[in-house]
């Protein structure tokens, strides 16, 4: 058996501590699978005294990740510090500059600096592994970077945020209001004290940015992603969706279109009988549409110490086996610039919910605005009236045939201006699945 | 860019011809993704004259695969000949003996000779890639061999035969009888003229044998697999399953138990609302239960020229990138002997369908036989009577709580002997999914 692979581990939070414990308890099994022992020889953490359930007394301790990456006698640098700047960025650069491969779970780091870091890795003849940076325990990075290389991808999409999916699932199954779901998610540790990053769609967008690059061989462009979170989704929407044969999920979608590549994160209605619609709770799922395969779907845990450690371990063992490859599947010099398709050009079906004031001609006026914008309707449902007297409203739900985002926005603006609505129109995009 | 990888291709059937076309039409893209051009320099086929939609005039032609593998000036040998003996076996051995890596889609070859060939590959410092040998376009081999290496697997299971799944789906959705479904499947090219290999469960068993080795680090043991095909599944079973909240699928399951490893292929009832139950038609799906991940599920096309070529291409590009690893994830010297768990020790729920003759005491007698074997019943459904007079029967459906195969067989033998039944009892195993 070859000499041990010496591992430097920056960060001993939930994932890092799981990883350290697993590398100890499963040491022999991993040595067999990697063809050589894997040893943590150096760590960096802020607080040395904390009990992490693993004996690290024999390893070298560094005060900061950059010192570890710069001076540690290591063959592999594992970055579990987090953050898109500062110690994470500097330590990864330091390791790559020494030609040391890097394993990271840091989606923010790569979404912001991925191409630059990939170029540095390429120059130094090494690789950044990042299986844990998207969809946790689901091997979507390996699948896209390696398994689908014979294919041309037309769309990658999925449920990439467990917090949102947990909340939408409970809202649907138990009829609980958004705010109560959020409070529960926070109590259970599924949501942060400041939940904006998750429920605003930003976490999913970071992951999508990486998948887009792998799918289309393009540079990463986080800023171009259209992002709409789940905070405006109501129980009424979810209920109406169910009646129409749909379920509501926060989907992240990257799709090749005639005008460029769409990247979007938003609440989405998908057919209730699709496999993707069965993905409930904190589980994640990613689907890829390609020329050779049609469609494949991967479902699994999107977060958690052990699930994320599983992804990190797969990268570590690849590195131990001497695997090197371009970080984003092709030489970064060959990544094409990201060509953005404008969201207004997005084509699809739409769910529209209006609170229509009880006035003569209101409905005719709405129908006319749709027709003016060449929007044809697949179904129209009027639900039971709400309110009283002058302010009595009828919730009206429209499902459109395929149309454009621009047409829908224009029609809804006109409907709003016509003064027949109480409040703003609500709209949820429908994703066609095969 | 490095020098081209020279590829020798044995077999130009559906998959081989797809592969040859793709390597021509996508030549530049693949060169980018592999880091070097991939060139077919030699082929072997029986019939040179057939038009395969690709220009192979510049390559060297061999009369047989063994000659190609023995004398071809190649860096990689792609075996798409098929069969567990003869030319397939001899040519793969010849290539490995020269230290040349092999890509194969041949499940029968590996299910019968996999360990022997893996040892040869290991001695010669090379690798057998076989992504296409199980579940077609689904990257389950890469996932198990690489992505899950941090995990200990407790169960791997899935829908591994598209023909059976197509037939069961149509039987369910359209109420068509087994024989008519089979005739349609044959007309559409989803089933062979002799369909035994597919509908008898043997095809799925071959694939399962490979997954079992990857899951549990054990030697391959095709002969130990318990196999029951779908030909005894009736529309009545499928209908009754639906009423009880289940769907019927041909599942292949390998599972670690206290007494060893179970390997079994049989019609199975799974919860109708599970993601696996939504897998319809010729689509395949594989799920893996592990210690770190809980469960992951992969869904995609299980067959077809392009889907299989996609898997072969992923292997080819891995080989071009210089990836080497033990064929079955660990050094074959470290594969443990397969320790068989006897099918009679299998634990699970059971669906039992009896045609009970209309006699006083019949039902009491059946209930007593169940109790005698410590089988407790979750539900009992009596469906509408059939036949007339003395031969009038009532179809009775029992769903058991978890029990053992031995207990169920013993109880059903006793019930049969008691003489209250018309025909044989029918039994379908229920698989618990999380």
Image (cartoon, coloured by chain):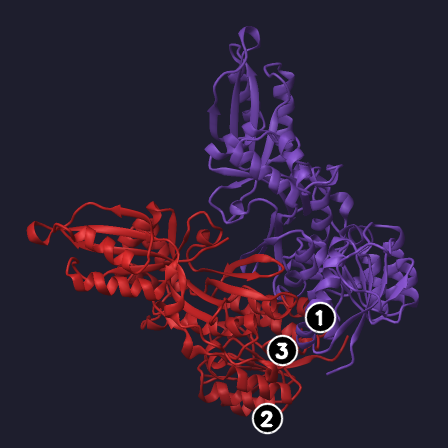
Chain colours: A purple, B red
| In-image side of A165 versus B180 (left or right) | right
Residue at 74% over, 65% down? A330
Q: Nearer the viewer, mark 2 or mark 3?
A: 3
Dot 2 and dot 3 residues touching (CB under 8 Å): no
Q: Chain ID for label 1? A: A
Helix, strand or loop for disc 1: helix
Q: Chain ID for label 3? A: B
Q: Position of residue A225 (x, y in %)?
A: 72, 43
Which residue is label 1 attached to?
Answer: A318
Regarding residue A328, the answer to whether it shows in the image is no
Which residue is label 3 attached to?
Answer: B330
To which quarter of the image does residue A374 belong?
A: top right
- Point out which mark residue B265 bears: none
Q: Are marks 1 and 3 on the same chain?
A: no
Q: Nearer the viewer, mark 1 or mark 3?
A: 3
In this view of the protein, which residue sits in the foreground, A431 or A49? A49
Q: Are marks 2 and 1 on the same chain?
A: no
The CA distance from mark 2 to mark 3 is 30 Å
Q: Chain ID for label 2? A: B
Which circle's residue, 2 or 3, is located before the other in the chain?
2
In this view of the protein, which residue sits in the foreground, B357 or A233? B357
- Point out which mark residue B71 bears: 2
The CA distance from mark 1 to mark 3 is 13 Å
Q: Nearer the viewer, mark 2 or mark 1?
A: 1
Q: Are marks 2 and 3 on the same chain?
A: yes
To which quarter of the image does residue B315 belong?
A: bottom right
| In-image side of B125 versus B302 (left or right) | right
């Amino acid at each position: 058996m070859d000499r041990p692979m010496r591992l430097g581990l920056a960060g001993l939070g939930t994932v890092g501590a799981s990883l350290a414990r697993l590398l100890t308890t499963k040491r022999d099994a991993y040595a067999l699978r990697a063809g050589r022992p894997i040893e943590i020889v150096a760590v960096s953490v802020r607080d040395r005294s904390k009990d992490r359930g693993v004996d690290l007394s024999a390893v070298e301790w560094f005060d900061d990740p950059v010192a570890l990456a710069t001076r540690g006698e290591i063959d592999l640098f594992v970055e579990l510090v987090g953050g898109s700047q500062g110690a994470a960025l500097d330590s990864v650069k330091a390791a790559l500059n020494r030609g040391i491969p890097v394993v990271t779970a840091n989606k923010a780091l790569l979404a912001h600096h991925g191409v630059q870091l990939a170029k540095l890795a390429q120059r130094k003849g090494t690789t950044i592994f990042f299986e844990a940076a998207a969809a946790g325990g689901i091997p979507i990075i390996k699948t896209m970077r390696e398994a689908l290389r014979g294919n041309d991808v037309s769309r990658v999409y999925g449920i990439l945020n467990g917090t949102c999916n947990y909340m939408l699932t409970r809202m649907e199954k138990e009829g609980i209001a958004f705010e109560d779901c959020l409070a529960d998610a926070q109590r259970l540790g599924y949501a942060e004290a400041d939940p904006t990053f998750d429920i605003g769609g930003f976490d999913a967008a970071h992951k999508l940015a990486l998948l887009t690059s792998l799918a289309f061989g393009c540079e990463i462009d986080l800023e171009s992603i259209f992002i709409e979170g789940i905070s405006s989704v109501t129980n009424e929407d979810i209920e109406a969706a169910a009646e129409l044969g749909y379920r509501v999920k926060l989907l992240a979608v990257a799709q090749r279109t005639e005008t460029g590549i769409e990247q979007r994160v938003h609440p989405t209605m998908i057919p209730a009988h699709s496999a993707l619609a069965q993905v409930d709770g904190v589980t994640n799922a990613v689907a890829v549409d390609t020329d050779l395969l049609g469609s494949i779907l991967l479902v699994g845990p999107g977060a958690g110490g052990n699930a994320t450690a599983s992804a990190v371990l797969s990268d570590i063992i690849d590195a131990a086996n001497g695997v090197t490859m371009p970080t984003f599947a092709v030489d970064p010099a060959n990544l094409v610039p990201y060509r953005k398709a404008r969201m207004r050009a997005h084509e699809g079906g739409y769910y529209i919910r209006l609170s229509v004031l009880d006035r003569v001609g209101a409905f005719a006026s709405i129908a006319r605005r749709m027709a003016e914008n060449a929007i044809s309707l697949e179904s129209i449902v009027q639900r039971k009236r709400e309110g009283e007297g002058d302010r009595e409203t009828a919730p009206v739900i429209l499902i459109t045939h395929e149309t454009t985002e621009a047409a829908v926005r224009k029609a809804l603006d006109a409907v709003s201006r016509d003064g027949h609505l109480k409040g703003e129109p609500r709209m949820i995009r429908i994703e066609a699945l095969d």
